[in-house]
Amino acid sequence: MNKIAIISDIHGNIPALNAVINDIRKKKIDNIICLGDLAGKGPNPAEAVDIIRRECKEVLMGNWDIMISGENDYEMVKWARENMGEERLDYIKNLPFSLDFYMSGRFVRLFHASPQGVFHRVHRNSPLDMILGMFDNTENTGKAFGEQSPDIVGYGDIHGAYISYFDNKIIFNVGSVGNPLDMTLASYVILEGEYNGRDKKGFQVNFIRVPYDVELAIKLAKESNMPEIDAYIQELRTGIYRGRK
């Protein structure tokens, strides 16, 4: 059985990222895939990009990666871009959209938000047609295996881990490493099965929650003079999205 660690939504939180990477190493997993949003919201965008490039075999494009690497007037985006450096900006600008592979006879597709685009947000309680649309082949995803649609879809973006089943298909969200908004523990997923195997064999989706030094992350944020710091601190300490009513 092969194991793949899937992480997402780092958002410049280095204490959380280091805790997750250390946990993955303890489990002796070499293959790490990141589903995007390396920077933004948190205080250490450049360091997050450098660690992800070093540790991950595959890195996909997130909505914050597009915003930061392009032109945007949002204060947090401008601050992150100014602290990245041109070479890192060029790197995140050219990240791929999605990743397809087989595992234990099942077609797995990973992306940041949805096949429709990195800004097309789908929640666990979204309308059924939106959820089923997560299994579509689109211009963004291409058709790596012809007309076949994926059996298993994994994504990030919403910062809340879950798994659901629809007509013999599986959809899961890996949660967030650096800005979890379901509980105050960093989140990632381990896929376990036969990587690139076309024969139906055992397969697991395991959700892992990792404690990290939240107060250190807050200290780094304060030292950075980043924008929107009060909202960021609230999210780290409570796991509640700043826009939730």
Image: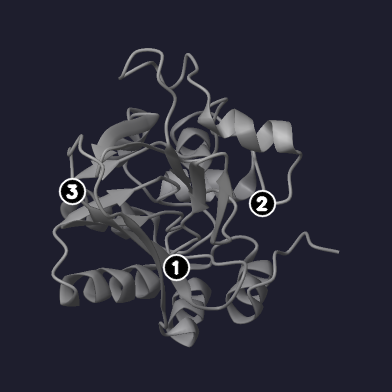
Q: Which badge, 2 or 3, is on the more N-terminal residue?
A: 2
Which label lies toward us, 2 or 3? 3
139 shown above or below 237: above
Task: Name the residue tied to disc 2.
Answer: 124
Mark 3 Cα-neighbour bin, 10 Å: few <14, some 14–19, many ≥20: many
- Cβ–Cβ under 8 Å for marks 2 and 1: no
- Amino acid type at image mark 3: Glu
Task: Name the residue tied to disc 1.
Answer: 187
User: Distance of mark 2 from mark 3, alpha carbons?
Assistant: 28 Å
Task: Name the residue tied to disc 3.
Answer: 194
What residue is drawn where x is 16% and y is 64%?
29
Residue in front for this viewpoint, 154 or 196: 196
**Is residue 82 shown left or right of residue 113?**
left
231 shown above or below 64: below
Q: Which badge, 3 or 1, is on the more N-terminal residue?
A: 1
Q: Residue 136 at what x, y percent from top left?
A: 53, 24
- Amino acid type at image mark 1: Ser
Q: Residue 20 at what x, y percent from top left?
A: 32, 71
Q: Which image quadrant: the C terminus?
A: bottom right
Residue in front for this viewpoint, 69 or 99: 99
User: Distance of mark 3 from mark 1, alpha carbons?
Assistant: 23 Å
**Identity of the residue furthest to the right in this view:** 245
User: Distance of mark 2 from mark 1, alpha carbons?
Assistant: 16 Å
**Is residue 120 shown left or right of residue 112?**
right
